[in-house]
Amino acid sequence: MKKKMTAALTAFAVLGGMGTGVYAGANLQEIKAYLNPGIKFKVDGQPVQLKNGSGAVIAPISYKDTTYLPVRSVSDLLGVTVKFDAASNTISLGEQTAGVSIAAGFDDMYHTKDPGKTVYKDKDYKDVFFDNASGDRGTSFMLYPNKKYQKLYLQVAAIGGDIKDFAVQDSDTNTVLKKQTVTTAGGLTTIEVDIAGVSKLYVNGDVKDGTTVFVPLTTSYYK
């Protein structure tokens, strides 16, 4: 369903949240249209309301027998990321072509660029999350995609022991988006997670004494 609806979204006319400055250099044509609050919406059979970024209910626009919907509102309902690039005046939907490293803005006590800790199997990843666990405890860190991306591709390696129940959660709702065991034998594992509409991620796992959690930040990315 999401793929079909993503294609359909390109026909929608309004991207909620764009400031007035965005329109200054645009090629705009004045029209006479009508707000149409009488139209009702359902997603997967369930009634929904279109809302803007502030949570206020908004109405579609009717113009020449065509109904125009706010892209951001619809994308939020369908779990499809929408992004506006002011420089190119382009709306992008869904997964981005180029990945964005999670290293930018990453802040954690186990974040390191120490060459003695950034090498895994003879490759230096330069910038990593390196948690050398002492005692049986959990390992965790936060990520902040801020609803800008469709996917997270997170790389992780377990050194000296397996990482049990390695999970990526929506921090706001405590919903587990992906959970798996990362084994030493499996090497560097890439975990793909759907994160459309998610602001904050809580990444965590169970580790035993002597296990090191190695996450290369430069090769883990959002799309």
Image (spheres, rainbow, N blue to C red):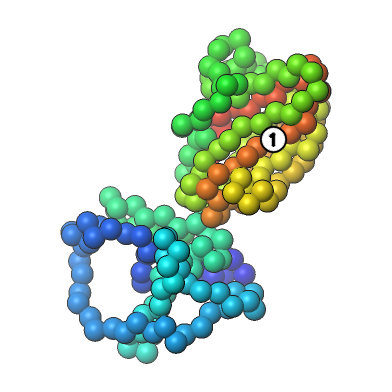
Provide residue 46's location: percent of width, then percent of height: 63, 76
Label 1 sits on a secondary structure element that is strand
Instruction: List the single residue furthest toward the bottom.
Output: 65
| Residue drawn 80% across the image and 34% down it | 164
Answer with the quarter of the image where residue 37 lies.
bottom left
Give whichever of 22, 125 is nearer the camera.
22
Answer with the quarter of the image where residue 35 lies.
bottom left
Provide residue 27's location: percent of width, then percent of height: 20, 66
Q: What residue type is labelled 1?
A: Asn
| Residue drawn 56% across the image and 61% down it | 79
Q: In which quarter of the image is the N terminus?
A: bottom right
Answer with the quarter of the image where residue 190 lies.
top right
Give whichever of 72, 191 is nearer the camera.
72
Q: In this view, does 135 lie above or below 175?
A: above
Provide residue 105's location: percent of width, then percent of height: 46, 31
* Location of mark 1 (residue): 204
